[in-house]
Image (spheres, rainbow, N blue to C red):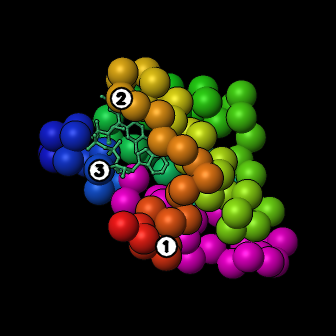
């Protein structure tokens, strides 16, 4: 399997890209599907200690899938929780869309 850093970077890229293309006004089916996807993803993420912590996080902080903005921010906060755990700098969640959808201005 891929090492946990390569796996992590690739996975965050996928997840934040899903947030960036998620509808601004999702249907109720899209909302329940995205919530299910995140929960199921957390059961199969192939770094078992990571997966356990992420599942516990989802129990505490329910997935917010009401809009692109809501999900993008929820995911950014979830990623920041992992950043804190690993001693990495926190990301300013006001900038998640700039990073993952519209591109940096500088
Ligand atoms: P990454 O954290 O992979 O981030 C990639 C890029 O995303 C960054 O360069 C930055 O531009 C951007 N970014 C950073 N923070 C945010 C944010 N909050 N919101 C939006 N964009 C952001 N590793 C472990 O060792 N232990 C764990 O328990 C663990 N749990 C994980 C759980 C999940 C669900 C995932 C997907 C990964 C987990 N990882 C874990 C891997 C870890 O989070 C990193 O991916 C890995 O350490 C590589 O880090 P990196 O510095 O390359 O940047």
Q: Residues within 10 Å of mark 1 (few under 14, many from 20)?
A: some
- From the Cβ of disc 1, is ligand 1 less than 8 Å away? no
Q: Under tag 2, what secondary structure?
A: loop
What is the x, y in percent for residue 65? 73, 59
Q: Quadrant of the C terminus?
A: bottom left
Is residue 89 shown above or below 87? below
Q: Quadrant of residue 45?
A: top left
Residue 41 visible here: yes
Q: Nearer the viewer, mark 2 or mark 3?
A: 2
Disc number at residue 101? Answer: 1
> Relative to 12, is 101 on the left or the right?
right
Residue position marked by numbered label 3 in the rendering: 9
Residue position marked by numbered label 2 in the rendering: 88
The residue sitting at 47% across, 34% down in the picture is 90
- From the Cβ of disc 3, is ligand 1 less than 8 Å away? yes
Does the magenta portion include 94? Answer: no
- From the Cβ of disc 2, is ligand 1 less than 8 Å away? yes
**Mark closer to the chain start, 1 or 2:** 2
- Residue bounds of the magenta highlight: 12-34
- Please report contact status of discs 1 and 2: CB closer than 8 Å, yes or no: no
- Could you tell me what secondary structure mostly forms the magenta stretch? helix
Residue 18 visible here: no
Q: Residue furthest right?
A: 28
């Amino acid at each position: 399997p891929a090492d946990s850093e390569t796996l992590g970077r690739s996975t965050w890229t996928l997840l934040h890209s899903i947030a960036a293309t998620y509808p601004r006004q999702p249907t109720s089916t899209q909302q329940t599907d995205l919530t299910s996807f995140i929960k199921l993803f957390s059961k199969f993420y192939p770094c078992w200690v990571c997966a356990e912590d992420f599942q516990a996080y989802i129990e505490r902080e329910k997935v917010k899938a009401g809009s692109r903005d809501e999900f993008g921010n929820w995911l950014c906060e979830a990623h920041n929780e992992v950043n804190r755990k690993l001693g990495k700098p926190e990301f300013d969640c006001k900038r998640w869309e700039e990073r993952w959808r519209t591109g940096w201005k500088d």
